[in-house]
C-alpha cells in the first residue's frame, strides 16, 4: 500500500474516496489516536491533555480566523460589449429582496392582482391575452426588465433575481397571462445578454419603444422524450448564410410574434438564431394546450428558412444555448412558485370555512396535512429557485442549482396543483374556482422549454 | 445586500472545520460506539476541549450549544448590511457537518447539551456565569408524555424559598454523564405555564418560561433518569 493511500481518508468508515484531509484533518487523526489511547488514563494525563488541547486550539485558530476573513472578490469576468454587470456578491446569507427588487415586486403584485387575475378565466377560454393586459404589462416595463440601462432598459445589473421575483409575483395572478406578458421580455433579455452590438442596436430599440413587438423564444419541439439539449431543428451553412429546418412547439403568442429566437443545431453545437417573422418558409399554427392557454401557444414550422450568418445570437460552441435553457427553466421555476402560492392562498381560507360533518374540513388531519405539505414544498421550491437565481445573478455557476430547482418545481408543482383541486372536493372539479386552471397550468412546468427567460 | 443562499463566506471555515472533525474523529469511532451503546466515548473529551478552545478563539463564529443566545444586530466585517443571529446559522451548518460524521456522537459531545442551549438562551447573567462550563442535559420526555409537552406531569411546587420537584423523565440524552439537567415542569396544579428548572446535583435553579421544547432519542444515549423524591432547591428568578 502506497503512502498516499494510507494518508487518504476515503474508502474507510464510509467516507467517499474524493474526500481530502486539510491540516486540521491530520491534526484530528493524531488527536483521535491520542484520545483513544489507554496510556492517557493509565498515567493519569487525560485531564492534562484536554487542557493542553484547549489552550493550543484557542491560540492556534486565531490566526486561521484572520486569514479566513480575507474576502476574495467574486467579480465580473471579462465580458465585452454592452452587458449588464453581475450583481456583486454580498458574502452573507440573505433572503431579503433589495429595495429596488421589492419595489418591482410590489408593482407587479398589484398588476397580477388587479389586472391578470380578473382576466384569467376569459383569457383561458379564449386562448388569448386581452390587449389591456398586454399594454398594462408594457406600461410597468416588463419587457425591459432584463435589458441594461445602457441599452435603454431599466436594470443596472444582471437582473436574474429581479426577473425571478417578478415572474413569481406575476404568476400569482395567472400563469397563462404571465407567460403572454413575459414572452417579449424573454427575447429582449436574450438579445441584451448574448447579442452582438449590431443585434442589440437593430432589435432592442423596438422593445424599448411604446410599441413593444410580440416576440418568442422557441426551444421546445413536439416529439417524445424531447431533450432541450438535443434539438432536431437544424441550421445548415450555405454560401449566403444559414438555412433552418425544423418544428418548434408551445411557442407563446407565435401568431402575432414579429421576432423569434429559435434553438437549432449548427455544426454539432447548439445555437440560438434570430428569425424575423417575415422570413420565407416560416409557418405558424395554433397549438392550444391543456394549460397556459392565455399565452396563445403555437407551433412554428421552419422549412428552408434562410437567415444571414450573423443571425446567430451568442456563441456557436453551445455555451449561450445551454445558458439560455437554464435561465428559461429558472423562469419556469419562479412561475411555478407563484402559482403554488396562489393555490396555497386559495385553499387555506377555503378549508377553514368549508364545513362538512358539522365542522370545518380543516379539522380533519388528512386535509390539514395536505395544506401543510403544500406550504412546506412550496417554500422548498422557492428557496431552491432563489438560490439558483442569486447565483446566476452573481455570475456564478448555477447548473446544479437550476437542475435541482426544476426537478422540485416540476414534481411538487404538479402535486400542489393536484392537491389544490382535491382540497376543494367537487368545487375543485368545476370552473367556478380557479384551482382547476392552476392544476392544468402547473402541468406545463415539466414540459416547457423556452418561452420565458430571466 | 443581494439575496444569497450560498454558505456565507464567514462561515465556510467553520463548516470545513466541522467536516474535517466529523471525517477524522467521528467516523473512525462511529461503529465502535454504535455497538458499545452505553460505553462512554472518551475520545470526545479531547474534542470537547478543542471545541471550547475554538469557541474562546472566536473561530467557531458562535456555533455550539451556548451560541443560541439571541444577539443584537451587529455590523459584520466585510458586509455592508447588518447580520442578525448569525450564530444560529453557524450552529446549523456545523451540526449538519458533524451529523454527517455521526449523529449519536454529535449529541454526546460534552458541554454541548441541549441544556446548555437552554441556559444560554434564557438564563440570566448570573446563571450563565455559574453554569457556563457545566454539561447540561435537557429532560423533557416522560413515560406517559412524548411530544405533547403541554401535558407533562413533573411538578415544581414552591415551598418557602425553594421549589420541590416530583416526577420522572426518560430518554435523557447524556443524562448519566452530564453535570446538570434542565427540565421543564409544571409550576403548579392549575398550570398553564411551563417552568424551566435547572437541576445541578441536588440544587435547583428556577429559570424562565420554557421555549423550544424538543427531545431526541438516538442510540448511544442513556435513556432513563429518575427524579423521584424531593429535591430541595434554591428559589431564583
Image (tube, grey):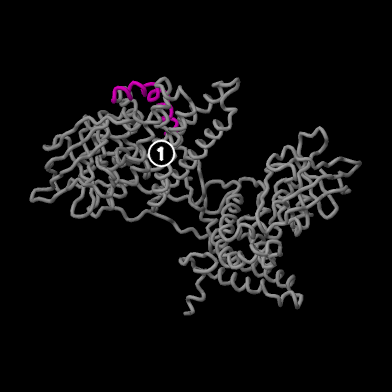
Q: Quadrant of residue A446?
A: top left
Dominant secondary-structure state across the stretch colored magenta: helix
Name the outermost residue toward the bottom.
A2
Q: Quadrant of residue B174?
A: bottom right
Name the outermost residue toward the left.
A239
Name the outermost residue toward the right.
B160
Of all chains, the one bearing label 1 is A
The span shown in magenta is: A103-127
Provide residue A40's location: percent of width, then percent of height: 72, 75
Left or right: residue B217 compared with residue B3: right
User: Quick check: can you spot residue A131?
Assistant: no
Above or below, B61 relative to A247:
below
Local secondary structure at mark 1: helix
User: Quick check: can you spot residue A12?
Assistant: yes
Q: Residues within 10 Å of mark 1 (few under 14, many from 20)?
A: many
Most foreground residue, A200 or B24: B24
Left or right: residue A122 compared with residue B182: left
Most foreground residue, A171 or A140: A171
Residue carrying label 1:
A334
Q: Quadrant of residue B159?
A: top right
Provide residue A292's location: percent of width, then percent of height: 33, 31
Q: Residue at x 42, y 24 (%)?
A: A429
Provide residue B156's location: percent of width, then percent of height: 83, 42
Q: Residue at x 49, y 79 (%)?
A: A3
For residue A122: magenta? yes
Left or right: residue A178 compared with residue A205: right
Amino acid at each position: 500500500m502506497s503512502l498516499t493511500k494510507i494518508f487518504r481518508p476515503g474508502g474507510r468508515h464510509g467516507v467517499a474516496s474524493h474526500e481530502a484531509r486539510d491540516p486540521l484533518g491530520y491534526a484530528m487523526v493524531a488527536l483521535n489516536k491520542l484520545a483513544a489511547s489507554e496510556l492517557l488514563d493509565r498515567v493519569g494525563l487525560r485531564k492534562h491533555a484536554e487542557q493542553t488541547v484547549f489552550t493550543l486550539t484557542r491560540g492556534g485558530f486565531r490566526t486561521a480566523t484572520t486569514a479566513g476573513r480575507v474576502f476574495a472578490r467574486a467579480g465580473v469576468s471579462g465580458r465585452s460589449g454592452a452587458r449588464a454587470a453581475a450583481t456583486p456578491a454580498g458574502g452573507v446569507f440573505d433572503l431579503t429582496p433589495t429595495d429596488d427588487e421589492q419595489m418591482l415586486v410590489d408593482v407587479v403584485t398589484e398588476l397580477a392582482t388587479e389586472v391578470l387575475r380578473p382576466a384569467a378565466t376569459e383569457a383561458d377560454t379564449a386562448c388569448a391575452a386581452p390587449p389591456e393586459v398586454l399594454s398594462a404589462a408594457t406600461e410597468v416595463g416588463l419587457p425591459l426588465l432584463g435589458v441594461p440601462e445602457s441599452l435603454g432598459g431599466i436594470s443596472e445589473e444582471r437582473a436574474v433575481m429581479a426577473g425571478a421575483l417578478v415572474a413569481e409575483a406575476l404568476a400569482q395572478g395567472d400563469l397563462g397571462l404571465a407567460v403572454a406578458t413575459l414572452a417579449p421580455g424573454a427575447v429582449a433579455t436574450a438579445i441584451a445578454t448574448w447579442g452582438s452590438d449590431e443585434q442589440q442596436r437593430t432589435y432592442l430599440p423596438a422593445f424599448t419603444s411604446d410599441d413593444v413587438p410580440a416576440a418568442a423564444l422557441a426551444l421546445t419541439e413536439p416529439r417524445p422524450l424531447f431533450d432541450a439539449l438535443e434539438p432536431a431543428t437544424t441550421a445548415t451553412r450555405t454560401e449566403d448564410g444559414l438555412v433552418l429546418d425544423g418544428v418548434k412547439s408551445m411557442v407563446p403568442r407565435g401568431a402575432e410574434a414579429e421576432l423569434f429566437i429559435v434553438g437549432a443545431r449548427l455544426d454539432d453545437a447548439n445555437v440560438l438564431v434570430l428569425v424575423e417573422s417575415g422570413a420565407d418558409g416560416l409557418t405558424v399554427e395554433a397549438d392550444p394546450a391543456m394549460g397556459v392557454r392565455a399565452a396563445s401557444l403555437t407551433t412554428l414550422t421552419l422549412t428552408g428558412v434562410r437567415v444571414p450568418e450573423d443571425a446567430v445570437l451568442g456563441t456557436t460552441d453551445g455555451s449561450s444555448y445551454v445558458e439560455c435553457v437554464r435561465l428559461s427553466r429558472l423562469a419556469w421555476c419562479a412561475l411555478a412558485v407563484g402559482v403554488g402560492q396562489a393555490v396555497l392562498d386559495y385553499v387555506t381560507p377555503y378549508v377553514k370555512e368549508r364545513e362538512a360533518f358539522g365542522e370545518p374540513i380543516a379539522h380533519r388531519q388528512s386535509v390539514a396535512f395536505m395544506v401543510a405539505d403544500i406550504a412546506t414544498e412550496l417554500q422548498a421550491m422557492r428557496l431552491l429557485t432563489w438560490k439558483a437565481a442569486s447565483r446566476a445573478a452573481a455570475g456564478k455557476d448555477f447548473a446544479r442549482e437550476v437542475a435541482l430547482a426544476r426537478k422540485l418545481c416540476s414534481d411538487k408543482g404538479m402535486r400542489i396543483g393536484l392537491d389544490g383541486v382535491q382540497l376543494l372536493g367537487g368545487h375543485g372539479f368545476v370552473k367556478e374556482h380557479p384551482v382547476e386552471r392552476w392544476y392544468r397550468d402547473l402541468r406545463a412546468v415539466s414540459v416547457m422549454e423556452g418561452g420565458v427567460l430571466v | 445586500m443581494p439575496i444569497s443562499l450560498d454558505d456565507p463566506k464567514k462561515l465556510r471555515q467553520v463548516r470545513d472545520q466541522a467536516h474535517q472533525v466529523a471525517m477524522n474523529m467521528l467516523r473512525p469511532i462511529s461503529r465502535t460506539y454504535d455497538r458499545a451503546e452505553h460505553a462512554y466515548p472518551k475520545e470526545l473529551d479531547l474534542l470537547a476541549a478543542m471545541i471550547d478552545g475554538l469557541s474562546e478563539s472566536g473561530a467557531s463564529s458562535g456555533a455550539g450549544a451556548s451560541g443560541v443566545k439571541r444577539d443584537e444586530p451587529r455590523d459584520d466585517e466585510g458586509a455592508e448590511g447588518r447580520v442578525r443571529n448569525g450564530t444560529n446559522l453557524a450552529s446549523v451548518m456545523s451540526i449538519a457537518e458533524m451529523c454527517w460524521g455521526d449523529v449519536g456522537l454529535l449529541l454526546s459531545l460534552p458541554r454541548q447539551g441541549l441544556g446548555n442551549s437552554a441556559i444560554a438562551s434564557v438564563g440570566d447573567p448570573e446563571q450563565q456565569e455559574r453554569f457556563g462550563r457545566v454539561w447540561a442535559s435537557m429532560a423533557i420526555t416522560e413515560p406517559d408524555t412524548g411530544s405533547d409537552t403541554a401535558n407533562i406531569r413533573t411538578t415544581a411546587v414552591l415551598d418557602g424559598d425553594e421549589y420541590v420537584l416530583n416526577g420522572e423523565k426518560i430518554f435523557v440524552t447524556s443524562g448519566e454523564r452530564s453535570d446538570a439537567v434542565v427540565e421543564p415542569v409544571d409550576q403548579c396544579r392549575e398550570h398553564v405555564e411551563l417552568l424551566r428548572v435547572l437541576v445541578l446535583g441536588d440544587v435547583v435553579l428556577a429559570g424562565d418560561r420554557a421555549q423550544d421544547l424538543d427531545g431526541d432519542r438516538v442510540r448511544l444515549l442513556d435513556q432513563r433518569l429518575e427524579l423521584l423524591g424531593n429535591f430541595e432547591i434554591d428559589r431564583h428568578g
